[in-house]
Image (tube, helix red, strand yellow):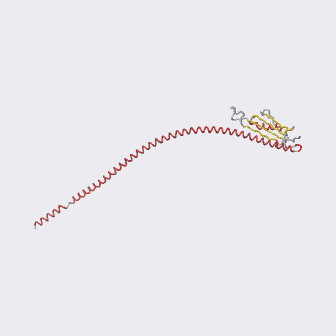
Amino acid sequence: MELTQLLDRIRTQCDHNRLPSPGERHHDLREEAAWAQMSLSGAALREARAELVEARQQWHSLEVEIETLHALEKGLESSLQQTQRMYSDQLQDLSQVIQGLESELEQVRGGLATQRQRHSQLLNTKMRLEREITTYRRLLEREEACSLLPGNICPNCPHTEPETDKDLPISTVKTQEILQGNVVQESAEGHGTIETEKVDKVIKQWEGSFFRGNPKLRKKSVSLRFDLHMAAADEGCAQTKQDSLPDVEVRLIMKRSRSIPAITP
């Protein structure tokens, strides 16, 4: 009986020794929390180290890329400078060519202006001559009308005297063809070199000398032809001024034919 009680007491004391005290429990909890925190910190440290390694790799790759871009930039700058020098030289050459062409264009414009002025003066001379020819044709028509009137009286036909000027350098050669004592054809040819301003005056004088003393000439029996060679009389003369008109070489030809009378045996 006493042995049984003793064993129970020993068991009770052992159980009492097995149960931790409140202080020991708190210490154990703190120790477990510290171990848990250490394990968490180790995982975070490993992750941080992995991120650091990755960042270093990225930084190294970026450094390589930056160096490559710097080399490319230097190459582009060198190419740009060469291109600028090349095109600068080309622009200088083109500017010189343009200046030369502009000077040539100015010379051509000046020459065209001079030629235009000369052409205008010659055209004015031609127009005056055409007006003179028209006037002479009208005179011929009036003389023809006067010759058809009875008594050859024509109050509307003016009597004109040809102008004479011995200073005008023109020579005239008249020819006649005579058949059986009758003049069947007359012709006159004048040739000379005169000033351009006096062409119309010379033609008028020359025609007046041909029609002088022939008031009954008919338009159909008279033909007038004149050639104007608009050129300098001496083509080799180098002293001809550009501002003045050159002398004109004039050749005037006028013919008059009459009906051939019947030939009597």
Q: Position of residue 90 (x, y in %)?
A: 53, 39
**Quarter of the image where the C terminus is located:** top right
Q: Position of residue 154 (x, y in %)?
A: 86, 43
Q: Position of residue 212 (x, y in %)?
A: 84, 37
The front one of 141 and 260 is: 260
Most distant residue in the left direction: 2
Q: Looking at the rendering, which quadrant does residue 5 occupy?
A: bottom left
**Quarter of the image where the N terminus is located:** bottom left
Most distant residue in the front direction: 265
Q: Looking at the rendering, which quadrant does residue 246 occupy?
A: top right
Q: Position of residue 211 (x, y in %)?
A: 83, 38
Q: Is residue 19 above or below residue 232?
A: below
The front one of 172 and 203 is: 172
Disc tally is 0
Horizontal relation, residue 165 to residue 12: left or right: right
Horizontal relation, residue 45 to residue 85: left or right: left
